[in-house]
Amino acid sequence: MFEANIKNVAVEKHFYTQPANTSVDDEITELERGFARLLDNLRDENDGFNIIDPIAPEFVSHLTSRTKHLRDSFIETTGGMTQILSDYLADERNVRSWLFEYYKRHPEVVKKAIDDAIVKMQLPRYQRRALRERLQLLISVERLMDQMDGDIQQYAVMFSMLAPTLIQKLPTLVKDGHIQALAKSLIAEPRAEKYRQLKW
């Protein structure tokens, strides 16, 4: 049986740091000094004591925003959603249906593709304008999908391969996102505001 020192329990090296950047960890250490005084005061109180110190909700908000459980929840949820979406889009019929609906909802994507193609032609301005207007009348979503039908199978294969690649990278992506969020604010103010409305 191995008895661990409490300072080594639930510890992960570089949990709040990125290579050559320890700023978040340093800021947490500084913030914890103020919280330590709060905890010392609370330990001296009896059970049932009404806590009116405004730092208490901030302390709880801070702790709940920096846990490993939070990261693991993001990884698990995003991984599950990614796998479901990948399985759905691995079917050619679903890919075609999704692309059709996407282009119907976002005609600006087609417009931008036309604009980009015309710019590369290096035509005079009046010819570009005339060509743009003509192409926008000719290229409907239905015609666009007919042109893309030959590539739909490749899209389906690509989507089927996407999930394993993304899921493998999720821990790193979530860690980076978590650290960036903490760098912006060590105390999640919306959460702290909700906690302030509770009786402590």
Image: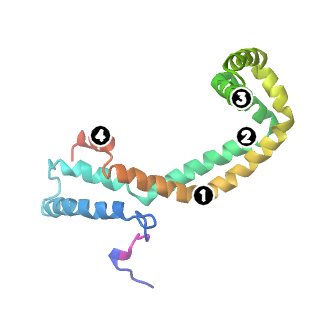
The residue sitting at the bottom extreme is 1
- x, y percent for residue 22: 37, 65
- x, y percent for residue 161: 74, 51
The answer to the question of whether label 3 and label 4 lie on touching residues, with beta carbons closer than 8 A, is no
Q: For the residues marked 2 and 4, what is the alpha-carbon distance in whole angstroms?
A: 38 Å
- x, y percent for residue 125: 67, 20
Q: Which residue is mark 2?
A: 88
Disc 2 or 4, which lies upstream in sequence?
A: 2
Residue at left offset 31%, top offset 64%: 26
Q: For the residues marked 3 and 2, what is the alpha-carbon distance in whole angstroms?
A: 41 Å
The answer to the question of whether label 2 and label 4 lie on touching residues, with beta carbons closer than 8 A, is no
Which contiguous range is marked in magenta?
A: 8-12
Q: Nearer the viewer, mark 3 or mark 4?
A: 3
The answer to the question of whether label 3 and label 2 lie on touching residues, with beta carbons closer than 8 A, is no
Q: Amino acid at mark 1?
A: Lys
Q: Nearer the viewer, mark 2 or mark 1?
A: 1
Q: Which residue is mark 3?
A: 122
Q: For the residues marked 3 and 4, what is the alpha-carbon distance in whole angstroms?
A: 58 Å
Q: Amino acid at mark 3?
A: Gln
Res. 169 mark? 1
Disc 1 or 4, which lies upstream in sequence?
A: 1
Q: For the residues marked 2 and 1, what is the alpha-carbon distance in whole angstroms?
A: 21 Å
Q: Mark 4, residues whose alpha carbon is within 10 Å: few (<14), some, or many (≥20)?
A: few
Q: Which residue is mark 4?
A: 194
Q: Secondary structure at mark 1?
A: helix
